[in-house]
Image (cartoon, grey):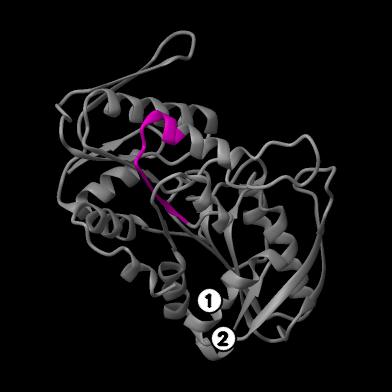
Amino acid sequence: MLLFSGRAHPALARAIAAELGTELVPTKAVDFANGEIYIRYQASVRGADCFVIQSHTAPVNKSIMEHLIMVDALKRASARSITVILPFYGYARQDRKHSGREPISARLVADLLKTAGADRILTVDLHADQIQGFFDGPVDHLFAMPVLADHIASKADPADLTVVSPDAGRVRVADGWCDRLGAPLAIVHKRRDKDVAHQVTAHEVVGEVRDRVCVLVDDMIDTGGTICAAADALFAQGARDVIVAATHGVLSGPAADRLKNSRVSEFVFTDTLPVPGALGLDKVTVLSIAPLIAGASREVFENGSVTRLLRSR
């Protein structure tokens, strides 16, 4: 078993390697003056089961291209198998056509990985479950909810909690949180302006939130507009406190300022993406996803069962 890392999130890759009791294979990665990427592994990979870690963090297109080049290099060096570890899957929000003349970019990313030589994908909390079907091969879809929910349960009385979905699309995920925490469900109805990116207006809250500690759950927070608007709607309905839990802290553009100025008491993320801009905020907590990914990688390598890791979903 050989473990490789791109340059997007080396800290997570080192943590996964430590959990597996191994080290990352030394890799030479160079950017040419025109932006082209050069990759060379400094150890033989012939006949090895290779695991390539790369989160598609900003700049996303560069992270994806580097990932593809790393996979291609392994294929051409006669690796026995190539498992792509994608803690955060780039372009996952473009999983279907909303209107005419649009791409399905999540499918394109899957096709590129397959063409490059990937045999298997291991990822965490896809924006849409259907993306698993875009890749022509095994996809191990892991869920960070147990990691996040256990942290919330350790800090708050479950009797005071209400799990809140920020929109109708997250209801099924929120329902899983309800089962784990033994808490009721509420939903924030919202309307998004289809012509203005990241423009959201929160409307009525469906469910009882007055004098409750509300746990807003989502797969990712990008600019923070949706989640902060949902939190404002909960406070307007009498919520005592709001905690936000999300797997991926994308935190683009104005996100850091919105988190800082929000009335939310705590934002909880995993480290599928580096969140250096938010680490200075006392209200931001980052939990390690490395044990989960390392456990799944070990099961894949040993031909074990990844399913048992999913039963706590």
In this view, 11 is above or below 300: above
Rendering coords of residue 15 (x, y %):
27, 49
Judging depth in this view, the residue of 156 and 138 nearest the camera is: 138
Indicate yes or no whether the magenta region holds residue 116.
yes
Residue in the picture at 58% in, 77% down: 175
In this view, 227 is above or below 208: above
Residue in the picture at 40% in, 75% down: 312
In this view, 221 is above or below 52: below
Label 1 close to label 2 by CB (< 8 Å)? yes
The residue at the far top in this view is: 33
Q: Earlier in the sequence, mark 1 or mark 2?
A: 1
Q: Which mark is residue 159?
A: none
Callout 2 secondary element: loop
How many other residues sit within 10 Å of disc 1, few (<14), some (14-19) or many (≥20)?
Answer: many
Rendering coords of residue 115 (x, y %):
43, 30
Indicate the quadrant containing the N terminus: top left, top right, bottom left or bottom right: top left
Residue in the picture at 52% in, 54% down: 126
Rendering coords of residue 174 (x, y %):
59, 73
The residue at the far front in this view is: 136
Q: Amino acid at mark 1?
A: Trp
The residue at the far bottom in this view is: 159
User: What residue is disc 2 on?
Assistant: 183
Stretch of the chain drawn in magenta: 113-124
Judging depth in this view, the residue of 55 and 302 nearest the camera is: 302
Q: Amino acid at mark 2?
A: Ala
Rendering coords of residue 169 (x, y %):
68, 64
User: What residue is disc 1 on?
Assistant: 177
